[in-house]
Image (cartoon, rainbow, N blue to C red):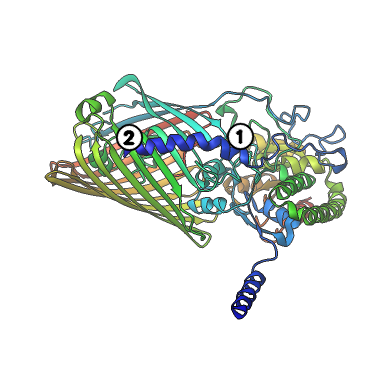
Amino acid sequence: MNKHINIVLVFTVMVCALLPASATVRVVTATTDFADITHWVGGDRVQVESLARGDQDLHHVDPRPSFVTKLANADLVVRIGMDLDMWMDSLLAAARNGKVREGGAGYVDASAGIHRLEVPSEKLDPSKGDIHVYGNPHYWLDPENGKVIARNILAGLKRVDPGGAGAYQQGYDRFVKALDEHMARWTAEMASLRGASVVTYHTTFTYFNARFGLRLSGTMEVKPGIPPSAAHIAELVAAMKRDHVKAVMTCPYYPTRFTDLVHRETGAAILVLPTSTQGVKGASDYFSMFDTIIAQLRAAQ
Amino acid sequence: MYKFICTIIVCLLLLIPVGGLAQETAPATPPVSTPADASTPAATPDQPATTPETPDTSLPASPPASLNPDISVIGNMLGSSGSHNVDPSLPKQHCQLDELEVVVGSKIYPGVSGLGVFTVGGEKDSSVQVEEGYITVEQLLPIAPIGARAGILRLPFGKANPLHPHAEPYADTPAVINNLLGEFRGNGAELVALIPTHSSLFLEAHLGRWKSVGDNPEDTTETFGDKPLTLGRLWASLPIGESIEAELGASAAYGAADPAVPFQSADLSLQGVDTTWRFYLPHEQRIELLAEGMQRKEPGTTSRGFYVLGTYRPGHFYEFGSRYDWCEAAQDSTKHESYVSLFATRFLSEMTYLRLQVKSGTNEDHQHVNEIIAQVVFGFGPHTHPLQ
């Protein structure tokens, strides 16, 4: 009998040894940026997946059934909010996971607490383009907003895994320290560009430009989401010559037809910049994404 | 059986608050930035604004709260011309409003949403119809990924039937849907289960009992009384790498149905299979290949049909596609029709687009037909669809 008890005990100990010391928190993020920041905060306690790829236009992510499976198994979901990732609504509904439903412990809207720019104050309709009622949603492109995103993720991780609160706080502190160090360097590097005029394809870089003092001369799009027209490009070229614009900030997923035309007419450099981590080669994480953007802007001036 | 399922759903609905309150909830108010964390962007007076006309950082961080539901309006204008009209429902020679759809939807309780879709049929029919009206419970119990829908809705049979006309990539309706399903809607309830697979395999099952609803629900009731229709669907999807998603679906329905006059039947059996392959390419390009086939059995008649569809989307603003239809007549399987269609779509926005479709083939009377269909869809207001 004792022999049997011993065998059972040994077997139990072996099984326990094979189990992870602590259950991994499964996190699904809308973007690769949030995935990277979650890695910083969560460390080894989290397993993170991003639904969108870094080179995708986050306005137009195709909801896939396989995303539902990821959300169904998630302990924490980190979404962009501000109506940019409305494609997640049908996915979350299909996932039938109460933990990550809005209001659930595992639901994180990373935009909470963000100081929003371009919040419309007038009546909106589609004639004004693809305007977001909650304001410009590309807030993660201000590196300082990385801290707000990280704090929202920290709060979510503490809710779903209170046992790891200390580790998450340490991860958050490490991220903020690293961000501050990078920020000091980026600010110095961008100092010579403060006040410089730029053109962007979409209003993607509003937060970035506000942070580093770049002045917007115009956008390639007629209005947000409305593609360029010949008449608009003619006006834009005139404005660029007047404002001595040396750089057009575009993204990997926008067409090059009109930017090439603007380059021929004005000589301005066309900068294909990442808008998310892994958006272009070299932008392998949240910090190197800004390194890539700043390096290209400096080279163009 | 029908009453039994409804009773179970009602009982589970009554349990929702218990499950909902048992969960820890995230704070309703977002955490407020502390002054020390420098989270405020540098859009301060000492810095230039990025867009002279738009940034207004003095506004509150959130728009005022509102109890308004999401309301959207979608108009579908169609016109066709050709040697023979393939689809008799299409307007001939001139463009006219085929359907105006008003959608009102809202969350009505945590995890519960309601949706009403009202249509006006343009010149064909000026009366307002309830196209769909149902509530969705995302999760009946916290411990299992099982939800429910109840009300009037386009039945989840195959890929094309649940789609609203404006969400289809073509201007007309595939022959197999017209012939074997018609307007396949039902009034009843279903359970929807996401089956846990512990892998990346997505597996969803539908099982419902419906009273079939055609254009005129009263006719159906008079014909079949309360005879129900039982419908089940199994839908699987598997990602193959980062760029390919493969889907397989199987649907079956048995009972009394009034898909559309004159195809109503008190003893109907429908089976369908569908497969979809999506290829996600760089620079927002997408290729989709879809095939759907079905069989309709009634006493003394069995009819079959299918369509194969391919679309290519080079970006956000254009889509090109082709479809091949082959289908037997619903009540005479010795007759069949087949068509090839080519279509091109120019999207002005997500909900507004222009489409041109060219269709050629042979109709049930062995006549060669050619047809050009023009479509203009316009929409405004917040509008989302369930995952399909």
Residue corresponding to mark 1: A222
Q: Nearer the viewer, residue B41 or A35?
A: A35
Q: Are marks 2 and 1 in contact (CB under 8 Å)?
A: no
Other residues around mark 1 within 10 Å, as few (<14) / some (14–19) / many (≥20)? many
Q: State the SS at label 2.
A: strand
User: What subunit carries mark 1?
Assistant: A
Residue corresponding to mark 2: B185
Name above or below for residue A69 compared with residue B96.
Answer: below
* Left or right position of B300 against A38: left
- Amino acid type at circle 1 is Val
- Where on the picture, by quarter, is residue B258? top left
Name above or below for residue A125 compared with residue A239.
Answer: above
Question: Horizontal and vertical percent for residue A227?
Answer: 57, 38
User: What subunit carries mark 2?
Assistant: B
Q: Residue furthest top?
A: B126
Q: Nearer the viewer, residue A16 or A230?
A: A16
